[in-house]
Image: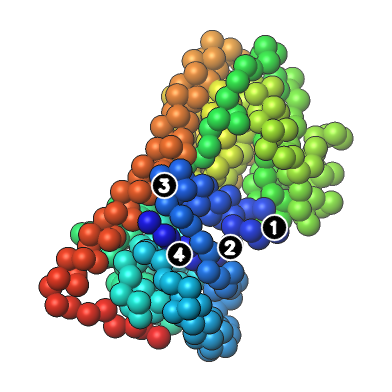
Amino acid sequence: MRIGFLTPMKSPDHTVPSGDRTFARLIVTALERAGHTVRCPSRFVTWRPTPEGLDALLAEAGAEIERIAAEWRLEGAPDVVLTYHNYHKAPDLLGPTLAARFGLPYAIVEASRAPKQAAGPWGRHFALADIALASADVVAAVTRHDHVELERYMPRRLEWVPAFIDTRPFLGERRPPTGNRLVSAAMMREGRKADSLRVLADAFGRLTGAAELVIAGDGAARPALEPLFPPGTFVGLLDQPALAALLRDGDLFVWPALDEPFGFAFLEAQAAGLPVVGGAAPGVADVVRDGETGLLVEPGDPAAFAEAIDRLLADPPRRVRMGKAARAFAGEHDIDVGAARLDALVTRAVAHRLSFTASGLKAVAPL
C-alpha cells in the first residue's frame, strides 16, 4: 500500500537527533520492509512547549491541508494516512481532515492521553488530540502505560505496537569483559536528559568499586554537564557503527531515565548483549525485564542507582546471564517484528474503513 506518513512531533529528516526522529525513521523502514511505499507529504510540526499560539497553529495547519490536498488531487492520494505520535502537546491537525476528505483509512502509532490536561491551559490542544483519536480507524499504543489509559477511552480500536529497533548493527562478538566498563548514551539538552545525567554523575561518585564510565552524545547542555564527570568521560556524538562498537565493548549500560517515555538506548544496549541499570520510568519497564535483563530502580535516586551498579559489577556470572537474556529479549523487539505489527495495523485500518463505508456512514472533516 501507499502510505502517507505524518509526524506532528518531528519529521524523519529533521536535523536534530532524538528518540522521536529515531522511531519515525524506524517506522518508515519497517513499513518498507513489509512491502509498503511510504511518503511524507509534510514536515509540519504541531509540537509546542507551551500552549500559547494555537490559533496561529490552526491557521498554519489549514494552509498545509490545502497544499497537501491539491498535491494529492494532482498526483494521487495514498491508500492510508498514518500518523506517528498524537497527544496534547502535538495533536495531529492534518491526518483527520485529509483522511475524511479523501475517504482514506487513518491510523495512529504512539498515542497517549492524559485526561488531567482536558481542563487546564492545554485543554484546546487536548480536545484536538481527542478528535484525532476519535477519527482514527485504529490506534497503536507503544507503552503499556499509554495502553491502559487509551483502553478506557477507545478499547475497540486499540492495538499495542511496542517500540522496536534494527538489532543487526548491534549484534556481533563482544570484547572480553573486564567487569568495570560502564557505558551510556544520551542527547545532552536541558530537561529530563540533563537531569538524568546529573543523577548519573551523583551515582557514579557513590560507587564503592573501581569503574570507568564512557558517555556518548552531545548537545547544548554538554559544557555544563561535562565538569560533573571525570575527564574523558564524554566521547561526543557517535554514528551507529561506532555506538554499536562502544556498547559491545562495555560491561554494563547505565541510564537513570528520568521521565523517559521508553528509551531506544536500552534496546540497543541489550541487543549488544549488555545488561542494564535504569530508572523505572513507566515506559522503561516495557523495554527492560527487571531482574532478568537488568535492574530498574526508582528514577532520581542516585544512591539506589549506585547500589544497583555495584551489585552487578560485583557479580560477573549474573552479568553474563543477564547479557545473554538481554540480547534474546532485544530480538523480540527487532524491526522485523515491528514490521509485521505495523503491517497488521494498517491492514486493520483499511478493513475498519471499508466496514465503516459499507455501513453507509460518512466521515466528517474536523477542520
Marks 1,2: beta carbons within 8 A:
yes
Q: Name the residue located 35 percent from the left edge and 80 percent from the top edge.
A: 101
Q: Which residue is nearer to you in this view: 293 or 300?
A: 293
Q: Which residue is nearer to you in this view: 43 or 306?
A: 43
Q: Which residue is mark 3?
A: 35
Q: Earlier in the sequence, mark 1 or mark 3?
A: 1
Label 3 to label 4, Cα distance in Å? 14 Å
Label 1 to label 4, Cα distance in Å? 22 Å
Foreground label between 3 and 4 = 3
Q: Earlier in the sequence, mark 1 or mark 4?
A: 4
Question: Residue 10 has which mark?
Answer: 2
Q: Which residue is mark 1?
A: 16
Label 1 to label 3, Cα distance in Å? 28 Å
Q: Earlier in the sequence, mark 1 or mark 2?
A: 2
Label 4 to label 2, Cα distance in Å? 15 Å
Q: Residues within 10 Å of mark 1 (few under 14, many from 20)?
A: few
Image height of 339 relative to 329, above or below = below
Describe the element under mark 1 as helix, strand or loop: loop
Q: Earlier in the sequence, mark 3 or mark 4?
A: 4
Q: Position of residue 339 (x, y in %)?
A: 41, 43
Mark 2: which amino acid? Lys
Foreground label between 4 and 2 = 4
Q: Name the residue located 57 percent from the left edge and 35 percent from the top edge.
A: 268
Q: Which residue is nearer to you in this view: 33 or 253?
A: 33
Q: Residues within 10 Å of mark 4 (few under 14, many from 20)?
A: many
Mark 3: which amino acid? Gly
Label 1 to label 2, Cα distance in Å? 9 Å
Q: Name the residue located 67 percent from the left edge and 11 percent from the top edge.
A: 176
